[in-house]
Image (cartoon, grey):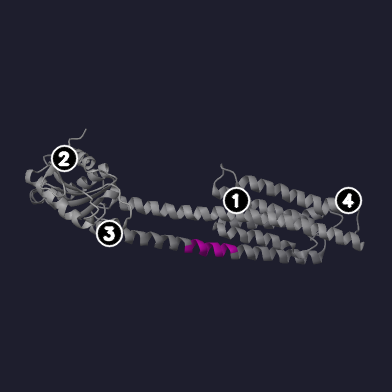
Amino acid sequence: MIANGEPMEELQTHSLHVESIRRDLDRIIDEWLHLHLRLAAILVAISLVVESGIAFFITKSQLLTTTIERYILKFIIAPSGSAALCLLVAVLAVHSKRLSSKAKAYAMSLLFVLICFDYYTAHSAFVAIYALYAFGIFLTTTYADYRLTGLVSVASLLSMIASELFLRWDVDKVSAFIDANQMVNFLIALSIIAGCSLVSSVTIRYEQRKNETTLRREVERELLKESILYDELTGVYNRKALHDALRALEQETTKSPLVFGIADIDHFKLVNDLYGHQVGDLCLIEFACVLCEYFGEGAIYRYGGDEFCLILRNTTLQDAEQLCERVRLRLQRAEFEDVPDLKVTACFGLTAYAEPDGSSHLFIQADEALYEAKRVRDAVRSYHPGTTVFSRGVSPS
């Protein structure tokens, strides 16, 4: 039933449209997750190549201050192996069917921080290596989750501090907590990372507002479209939607069996006069609900007043007669709490779609059949082209 006069189907369509938009957004996030993973893999691969190139250059230039084995273990195998392990865990997380998209985004982003930690610890002598952390923070902005970006920012800052503390026990390097020049560079790096975090958070905030505005406008546009095509009282399609459907029917190249029908409530004016228009509206709503129950919401059109049109696809005239008989009998059992003595009946006029005549004759033929049904009331009649015979509704089996 319909509450407060709002069309049920309109609300359902509205909800479905919002869900469709959300699915599109989830698909975009999923695509970005896989791109995030590929960028991490590219970083690991490039780092391995660069580290190997640097090792080759240092060895040939006789700049090596330690053994080759120690250098390879410390600056190539250890960071690349640890980064590769993080990358493997990221692959498993991104392709996991148990984790939600949000959990995957958090896992991927934090594992990227660990990869940055590996390279920052191994190559802290290169001041610009901290830029990897900024890169990792910017990658989270597409997820439009300021909590995630904040978490990654804090994790990046803490990992940089942890790396410098770790370097205090590294005899081959100088920690920022020991050397004043290194401390200045370290503080500058921390400030830049904090600035990147702030810029990313502000960007996400405005991105969220933009997405919310876009979603709201899309919903408003859909609701406006629905208000044009749907009847406000009953929630079924209106006259404009019917004309659009008939025009579309004319343009179809392949025609399947189709029945067009007109149905209206018997003595509806008398119902309004005796019980008032509010009860009359309840009758219309109940009639529309029963029609939708048997024919489906997409087949019912309110043409005006108590008159409804039916477009029944893939249906023969005999099948349509049986369905209308079921509706007619079902309507006889309809009860109204406020008006227990009110009994509602309806008449149906049906006609089959004929290729030569097209949709232009459907109204005329169905209306003639409805006129015959109205002569006896509470009946179903079908029009047969080329004759003056109107078949009675077939009793439902």
Question: Can you identify the residue that label 2 sits on?
Answer: 393
Judge the density around disc 4: few (<14), some (14-19), many (≥20) Cα neighbours within 10 Å.
few
- Image quarter (top left, top right, bottom left or bottom right) of the N terminus: top left
Q: Earlier in the sequence, mark 2 or mark 4?
A: 4
Q: Amino acid at mark 4?
A: Glu
Question: Can you identify the residue that label 1 sits on?
Answer: 106
Question: Can you identify the residue that label 4 sits on?
Answer: 69
User: As drawn, is 12 to the left or to the right of 85?
Assistant: left
Q: Amino acid at mark 2?
A: Gly
Q: Looking at the image, is mark 2 or mark 4 nearer the viewer?
A: 2
Disc 1 from disc 3: Cα separation: 51 Å
In this view, the residue in front, 102 or 161, is: 102
Disc 2 from disc 1: Cα separation: 64 Å
- Dividing the picture into quadrants, the one containing residue 289 is top left
Q: Is residue 274 magenta?
A: no
Judge the density around disc 1: few (<14), some (14-19), many (≥20) Cα neighbours within 10 Å.
many
Residue 354 location (% of width, % of height): 23, 51
Q: Looking at the image, is mark 4 or mark 1 nearer the viewer?
A: 4
Q: Are marks 1 and 3 in contact (CB under 8 Å)?
A: no
Tag 4's secondary structure? helix
Q: Is residue 189 above or below residue 363?
A: below
User: As drawn, is 372 to the left or to the right of 15?
Assistant: left
Tag 2's secondary structure? loop
Question: Can you identify the residue that label 3 sits on?
Answer: 247
